[in-house]
Image (spheres, grey):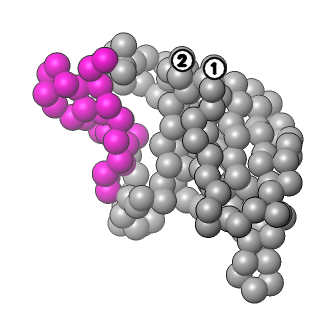
């Protein structure tokens, strides 16, 4: 099982898996750092608790969802969907539900003064990718808000 002997991590070349038993790393999903810039701390990687899905936030307005086909070596992830927001929207702190069936994000729009407006918690179904805005966050200060694990 992945969580006992492997760890996923990001480097400039992409998403890697490190196998503690074999003491080696291998590239799982490439990322073109020359084209898009180096991997950064603003990228978010999340694995559902049951290991069925992997979520990778590569850019402020793009989420890639992968089905975990196999956790044995070689690790095999199949891209299911890329959610791309309109240029005025951003995703923050995307988190998968424990069963990988939903994604919750802190979603915002850009205001006229480069401030965030229309802040909300949004849930996406990972099968249909239907969107459901579940909670208005306009009364919260964005810089002090965050989402953790979904339990």
Task: Determine the image quadrant of residue 101.
Answer: top right
In the image, residue 1 sits, relative to residue 97, either above or below, namely above
Instruction: Please say whether residue 30 is visible from this viewpoint.
Output: yes
Quadrant occupied by the C terminus = top right
Q: Which region is colored magenta?
A: 4-29
Badges 2 and 1: C-beta atoms under 8 Å apart?
yes
Is 74 positioned to the left or the right of 91 in the image?
A: left
Q: CA distance from mark 2 to mark 1?
A: 6 Å
Q: Which residue is mark 2?
A: 50
Kindly report the secondary structure that dominates the magenta region of the rendered protein. Answer: strand
In the image, residue 48 sits, relative to residue 121, either above or below, namely above
- Say which residue appears at 83% left-offset and 63% top-offset: 138
- Say which residue appears at 16% left-offset and 19% top-offset: 21
Task: Determine the image quadrant of residue 140.
Answer: bottom right
In the image, residue 108 sits, relative to residue 30, either above or below, namely below
Percent of width and height locating residue 64:
58, 43
Instruction: Please say whether residue 79 is visible from this viewpoint.
Output: no
Percent of width and height locating residue 10:
35, 47
Percent of width and height locating residue 48:
55, 27
15 inside magenta stretch = yes
Is 111 positioned to the left or the right of 21 in the image?
A: right
Residue 99, disc: 1
């Amino acid at each position: 099982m992945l969580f006992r002997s492997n760890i996923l991590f990001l480097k400039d070349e992409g998403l890697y898996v490190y196998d503690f038993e074999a003491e080696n790393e291998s590239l799982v999903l490439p990322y073109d750092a020359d084209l898009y810039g180096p991997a950064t701390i603003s990228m978010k990687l999340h694995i559902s608790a049951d290991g069925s899905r992997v979520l990778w936030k590569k850019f402020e307005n793009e989420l890639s969802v992968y089905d975990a086909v196999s956790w044995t070596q070689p690790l095999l992830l199949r891209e299911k969907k890329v959610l791309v927001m309109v240029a005025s929207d951003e995703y923050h702190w995307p988190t998968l539900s424990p069963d990988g069936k939903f994604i919750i994000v802190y979603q915002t729009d850009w205001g006229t003064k480069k401030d965030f407006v229309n802040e909300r918690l949004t849930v996406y179904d990972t099968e249909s990718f239907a969107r459901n805005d579940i909670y208005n966050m306009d009364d919260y200060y964005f810089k002090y808000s965050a989402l953790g694990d979904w339990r």
